[in-house]
Image (cartoon, helix red, strand yellow):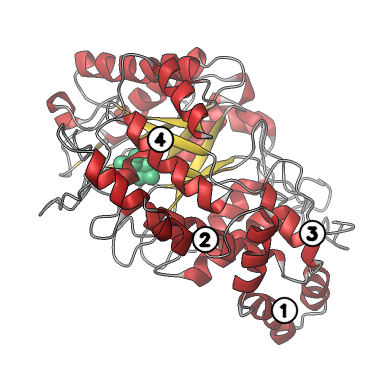
Amino acid sequence: MRDLTAVKDALKNHQIELPSWAFGNSGTRFKVFGQPGVPRNPFEKADDAAQVHRYTGVAPSMAVHIPWDKTDDYAALSAHAKADGIRIGAVNANVFQDDDYKLGSVCSPDPRVRKKALAHLLECVDIMDATGSSDLKLWFADGTNYPGQDDIVARQDRMAEALAATYARLGEGQRMLLEYKLFEPSFYTTDVPDWGTALLHCQVLGDRAQVVVDTGHHAPGVNIEFIVAMLLKVGKLGGFDFNSRFYADDDLMVGAADPFQLFRIMHEVVKAGALYPGQSTGIAARDDPGANEITASGADADGITASRADADTTGITASGAGGRATGITAASADAGAPGITARSTPARAAGPGVAFMLDQCHNIEPKIPAQIRSVMNVQEAIAKALLVDIEALREAQLAGDVLGANAVLMDAYNTDVRPLLAELREEMGLARDPVAAYRASGYAEKIVSERVGGTAAGWGA
Ligand code: RM4
Ligand code: MN
């Protein structure tokens, strides 16, 4: 898409969700450096998140994390956010900060602990009802540290059981987003370590269970855009937790470590029409000549698709009855739903589409401008992805023009989109430079002088 008006329109439609915890104090296991003016409760976090939206115009929601954002009155929190000009987004469950969870939460060998963890997941759905949130985001610290510590498969069964019970509790318009992470805090096995495990669970659960890709949760060198492309293809990408990493799960500002990777991810999103519900891909006809020619037998048009009948027998079982079943089955009727077909058309995700969330911690930099910078970084990557000349790219690809195809992509990536984004902001009635406008507003000084006393929000608070 190289029509600049269309690029700007797409950018105006794209929304980014902010994490409440980015506004609180955070640190490493060595030290949490407190900052003055930090919010003391979720209401003040919403006030700060609203500042980010005020200067960027594209960040109208704030995810909450329970119990960090626990309050007696979630409807009041929603109303407060609304008065600030934003809304409460995903509800994140926290089953990793309680002594009971030393050996895991929903995968713990202790049924009492599993019950307690499940009760928390269900409580999070109650909170969604009160806040009007559509997304329940689940990340589990569950895992083991030593070989032999617990049974890998039994833990999967326990996980499947808890997920099935939570899924069954979801109401109209609500979905479950399951996030994987390679390691940490567990160092030997993690119970949902990768997109394959997350996808297996989500496929068993049904349409309203989707995978979250946190960009910091992979081994070094993993091709994240490949994972994104595959999940989009089967309609199972529920959302992103954006951040950057140099070494492990560093939670740095998105786009700080590897803006090229962010662009490559966004290229897949744009191609799949997943930037926002109703996004046009700018591709007139998606039929690649020959796309259906690569099938195993030639007789069956389904290509890479495993037959649906098979899908039922290879899932993840919640019953633990196991028997001859080889995997993770919650005996869902939907198990065969999203498969990979030989067609190149990506499946459209059901419901609200892909949630573009930030999941970052600003340990040493001021938090509000860091969130503004992160939103800008995401926008820059998207703008560049929207500038890719898709038709020229496809032509070069089909012609086997390796250098030509790569050049099309790099041309877009190497475009300086900052003037375009400044123009976009002006059209939206915003300052051309959001960070400078925030700095000039005096808000940072105001919160420092007003937020005196009480306990600053932060890790464990
Ligand atoms: C995890 C994961 C979750 C986040 C917690 C705080 O590593 O990324 O999304 O909620 O950290
Ligand atoms: Mn995350």
Q: Which mark is residue 6?
A: 3
Residue 182: tell me if it is visible.
no
Q: CA distance from mark 3 to mark 1?
A: 19 Å
- Please name the residue shown 60% across and 60% down the image: 266
Quadrant holding the N terminus:
bottom right
- Does the Cβ of the disc 4 residue fall within 8 Å of ligand 1? no
Query: CA–CA distance between discs 2 and 3?
Result: 19 Å
Q: Which residue is mark 2?
A: 376
Mark 1 = which residue? 408
Q: Nearer the viewer, mark 3 or mark 4?
A: 4
Dot 4 corresponds to which residue? 46
Label 1 neighbour load within 10 Å: few <14, some 14-19, many 20+: some
Q: Amino acid at mark 1?
A: Val
Residue 146 image offset from top left, x and y in percent: 15, 44
Left or right of 289: which side holds 420?
A: left
Vertical order, 85 against 105 (above or below): below
Image-quadrant location for residue 317: top left
> Picture coordinates of residue 362 (x, y %)?
29, 54
Q: Quadrant of the C terminus?
A: top left
Q: CA distance from mark 1 to mark 2?
A: 23 Å
Q: Where's ligand 1: which quadrant?
A: top left
Q: Amino acid at mark 2?
A: Met
Q: Amino acid at mark 4?
A: Ala
Spot the residue most to the left: 30
